[in-house]
Image (spheres, coloured by chain):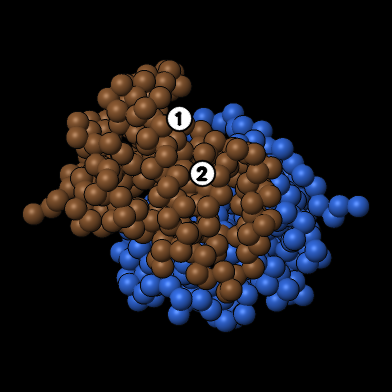
Chain colours: A brown, B blue
Amino acid sequence: MKEYKVLEIKQSVFSSNDREAERLRGELKEKGVFLLNLMSSPGSGKTTTLKRTIAALKDELRIGVMEADIDSEVDAKAISETGVKAIQLHTGGMCHLDADMTRQGLEGLDTGDVDLAILENVGNLVCPAEFDTGASKNAMILSVPEGHDKPLKYPLMFSIVDVVLINKMDVLPYFDFDLEKCREYVHMRNPKAQVIPICAKTGEGMEDWYQWLRDQVKNWKEN
Amino acid sequence: MKEYKVLEIKQSVFSSNDREAERLRGELKEKGVFLLNLMSSPGSGKTTTLKRTIAALKDELRIGVMEADIDSEVDAKAISETGVKAIQLHTGGMCHLDADMTRQGLEGLDTGDVDLAILENVGNLVCPAEFDTGASKNAMILSVPEGHDKPLKYPLMFSIVDVVLINKMDVLPYFDFDLEKCREYVHMRNPKAQVIPICAKTGEGMEDWYQWLRDQVKNWKEN
């Protein structure tokens, strides 16, 4: 039997996504649910990063994961195998999730017993950046093979994120990726963004990421 | 002095993109200009592949390149250094190009003396697949670090392309990428798509790609 649901998301009817996003954020705050919106290009390692993060934090936080994809169930299957609550969201061809679509996902997931809800957004550096999902914080992954120039080409994405994980640090020797230049470009777009180099496969740097996440969830619940 | 122009693309006013795309394709056919629409995720190696392709083919074909990005000029600069005509298109935040935007780009490029015009589309596996640009053929690059499951998650993109280049084959030993599975998934979406493994950095497999491109341009001009 499948350990996760598949939900076909409906298109939103609300005229102001920003208002819907603020409303959702307020409700989540009241319920003590921290919502992380995780974005990246296709294949940057979102699911692998999540699997390792769940294994490290599932004894201290109650976690629920929404996997958004245009099609397939491979990610929800992978996440459900970690033992946490997972739901697959199908966006019906849409390239992003807005606040109302995220709300449908949260209802499908049922966050009554969740401290940390994670939305793995559609793999795309453009459109997801344009829609506030109502998340408490925005995170993104840039992987070494993609190159350090991405903040130059996808300005909006880098300007709206609170933390940038630089993933696949294990293959740094095989690519022309300049970590310091990358940091500089990220901060050009967004001086406040945290930059954390990691390798979700080997575990390198992951403790810094866990600590960032722990701090954010704690702040959200207490302040 | 810059060797390329930067063009700020305007939003289209046409109601039917499909009709505009067919009209553009017809005009290009008449003029003997083959238009290749090259798509991929961010950082898959579109520009590196183009640079090597231009070096190999510029003595037999007159090439012009349109580099579409939301921001930055790094790609047009890189292409103009190869000695062919290049133009940077800025999409004004848009995640794709449609036929009218492509037409603006072609006019900016001036294709009077061009056999092969190449549009490097915005790095995105979702939206560019939804808009016919009027191209003669659609090509895409999937790079090894992105993973072989991408045809499962981005069905439309894989269903509309004529050729899939599997790039960064040099790093295959460092990633869990199954080339045969990838081929199988691509053909599940699109039985007619050619799959050509390449490495734009080392040149591996590039001759097959050049031959595909030569054949297409020849067919376009003759039939």
Q: Work out whether residue B123 or residue A146 is closer to the camera in this orientation and state it.
A: A146
Q: Work out whether residue B98 or residue A221 is closer to the camera in this orientation and state it.
A: A221
Which element carries disc 1, helix, strand or loop? loop
User: Would residue B22 be seen by someone viewing this image from the given angle?
Assistant: no
Task: Please name the amino acid that badge 1 sits on.
Answer: Asp
| Residue at which label 2 appears | A163
| Residue at which label 1 appears | A132
Q: Would you identify the image quadrant in which residue A110 lies?
A: top left
The residue lying at 72 percent from left, 37 percent from top is B8
Q: Work out whether residue A112 or residue B59 is closer to the camera in this orientation and state it.
A: A112
Q: Residues within 10 Å of mark 1 (few under 14, many from 20)?
A: many
Q: Viewed as shown, does residue A27 lie left or right of A140? A: left
Residue B180 spot, x, y in % from top left: 35, 76
Residue A217 spot, x, y in % from top left: 37, 36
The residue lying at 52 percent from left, 30 percent from top is B15
Residue A38 spot, x, y in % from top left: 42, 44
The answer for how far apart the CA atoms under marks 1 and 2 are is 16 Å
Task: Please name the amino acid that badge 2 sits on.
Answer: Val
The correct choice, above or below, for A28 with respect to A209 in the image is above
- Which residue is the extreme one toward the right? B1
The residue lying at 71 percent from left, 47 percent from top is B72
What is the chain letter for disc 2?
A
Residue A50 spot, x, y in % from top left: 35, 53
